Amino acid sequence: MARFVIRCYTPKVLELGNELSSARAKRMVDAIHEAGAANVDIFVGPEYFFTYNSDKLLHGTAPIAYSADDADLARSLIATASARWPKMLIIPGTFFMIQGVSNPRIFNTAFAYLGGQKLSECSKFDSASDKNYAARSGLDFFPGETGRAIPFKGKSFYLQICADATNRPTVPCDMSIVTSFHPGAAAATHLADFGGRRVIADGEGESAMASGYEQKKFLRVPRWERNLKTVADYQIDL
């Protein structure tokens, strides 16, 4: 059995406003460096962290999708930060971004970094909200997958984005990681299929960890540990 320290970084996305993309990237990189210095094993950020006009996410018509260039710049800075902390798995929330040149479409994607390299990625499967957000940029939202298993230190962590957590994992896993913006009922869905464990980093300024497995038995009602701080650390034995 191994102990993992998981840090959720959950600033309120709506309060980030329309800061420059370079400032948004620096905000995330600074949080990654703080986590690395604290010997965190896994770092998780919130859904929609990388968006324009974040304060108008829920109300308004302003486009929020990152350009490919701004997304690439932020990702390169995160990869550089990852190289400084090569033992920490970094999932810096999601990029709501434009991809493609001849046929540009919008994706809501979470990337995972390890040792300075992109280890994996997962794009949100389907969302009526994301379709509406994409329409603000005059483009279509392209659905991805319901989740992605990420291997790390001999364990399998299943990454999902917000409501995609209502779907069961497609492969066996040891724990669920959810980056979200108001997860709602998805928070406790199918926990037994994810080893009875789930951590959520939410863009409304909170995080949580569910433990539904104790003494080799699944609990009928999982135990939840919740935190309203921007930075919260959770320990889990797997």
Image (cartoon, helix red, strand yellow):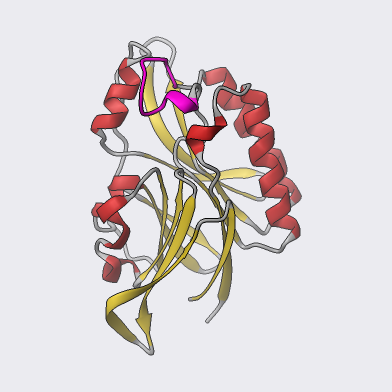
From where the camera sits, is residue 154 visible?
yes
**Left or right of residue 65, residue 18 in this image:** right
The answer to which image quadrant residue 216 occupies is bottom left
Residue found at x 54% / y 26%: 17
Residue found at x 36% / y 18%: 60
**Left or right of residue 2, residue 198 in this image:** left
The vertical placement of 190 against 205, above or below, is below
- Residue 86 coordinates in the image, percent (x, y): 70, 54
- Residue 4 coordinates in the image, percent (x, y): 57, 70
> Predominant secondary structure in magenta?
loop
Q: How many marks?
A: 0
- Residue 42 coordinates in the image, percent (x, y): 58, 59
The vertical placement of 188 against 51, above or below, is below
**Left or right of residue 150, residue 217 in this image:** left
Residue 160 within the magenta-colored segment of the rendering: no
Q: Residue furthest bottom?
A: 215
The answer to which image quadrant residue 158 occupies is bottom left
From where the camera sits, is residue 86 visible?
no
Name the residue nearer the viewer: 141 or 202.
202
Residue found at x 71% / y 39%: 80
- Residue 20 coordinates in the image, percent (x, y): 63, 21
The residue stretch that appears in magenta: 54-64
